[in-house]
Amino acid sequence: MSHGVFGPVTNHRTCPGCQSSFTKDVKNNTWDSMGVASPECYEVFLKIISYNDVRFSFLPLKKLIISAYAVQHLSCLEVQIALGIDRDARASSVQDIPLHLLRLFLTVEKGFSTEKVEKEFDDVRQKILEKRIIFLEPKRTKGLIELRATDVWDSINYAKLTQEEYVDLMRRFAETTWDAWFEYHDFVRNIYKTHR
Ligand SMILES: [Zn+2]
C-alpha cells in the first residue's frame, strides 16, 4: 500500500479537520478553499448550508453553523502546503479560528440573542483588527466532538425536522463544539474581557 500526503491510498479518506471518515467520492475532488476540510466533508457542509438557505433562511443560524464547522476544521499545515495554499491564506485561516470560537462563546456561554452576539462580535473583531493582534494557531482539541457535520446532515436527511427540532440541532452543533474546545475557554473569555 502506498502512502500519500493525505494518508494511505485507499477508498477511504479521513477529513483532516473533524476526522470523519468517508468513502472517497472520485467525482468530487475539490477541497475547501483553505484546505482544512476534505472534499467529502466540505460537500456535506455545503449541503447543510444549502438546506438552511432553502428551508430556514429566515432563522439567524447561518453564521453559527459556519463558526461551529470552522472550529472543527483547524488549519493543517501539511495538507495546506500540499494543496499549494499560500502563507497569507494559511495565516488568515489561523487568525479566524479564535473569532469563530468567540461567536460560539457569546452564543453558548453568554446566552446572548443573535443580534447581541453579532454586535459584540463585531466590536471585539474591530478592536482586534485595529490593534493588529495576531493569534497563535489553536491546536486540535483533546475533547470529544460529539456532533460533526456528517452527524448533523444525517439528522437532517433522515428526519423531517420541525423548526424547533432544527434550531435545537444547530444549537447542539454549536454547544458540543464549544464544549469540545474546553482547553480554549479561558483564552476566548480573555479575548472578550480584554477587547470588548
Ligand atoms: Zn470534516
Image (cartoon, rainbow, N blue to C red):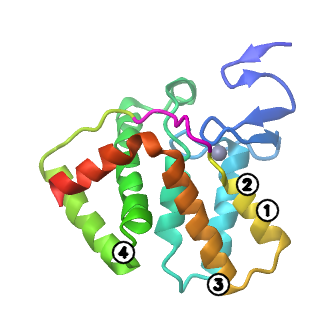
CA gap, disc 4 and disc 1: 28 Å
In reply to whether residue 143 is colored magenta, the answer given is yes
| Residue 74 at least partly seen | yes
Q: Which mark lies nearer to you, 2 or 4? A: 4
Disc 3, ligand 1: is the CB inside 8 Å? no
Q: Secondary structure at mark 3?
A: helix
* Amino acid type, residue under disc 4 in the picture: Phe
User: Left or right of 4: which side holds 190?
Assistant: left
**Residue at 12% across / 47% down in the picture?**
131
CA gap, disc 3 and disc 1: 17 Å
- Residue 87 found in image quarter: top left
Q: Which residue is mark 4?
A: 112
- Whichever of labels 3 and 1 marks the residue nearer the N terminus, that label is 1
Circle 2/circle 3 CB separation < 8 Å? no
Disc 4: CA contacts within 10 A as few (<14), some (14-19) or many (>=20): some
Q: Nearer the viewer, residue 55 or 195?
A: 195
Q: Which mark lies nearer to you, 3 or 1? A: 3
Q: Which residue is mark 2?
A: 150
* Amino acid type, residue under disc 1 in the picture: Asp
The magenta segment: 138-144
- Residue 142 found in image quarter: top right
Disc 1: CA contacts within 10 A as few (<14), some (14-19) or many (>=20): few
Circle 3/circle 4 CB separation < 8 Å? no
CA gap, disc 2 and disc 3: 20 Å
In the picture, the disc for residue 74 is none
Disc 2, ligand 1: is the CB inside 8 Å? yes
**Residue at 67% across / 38% down in the picture?**
19
In reply to whether residue 30 is colored magenta, the answer given is no
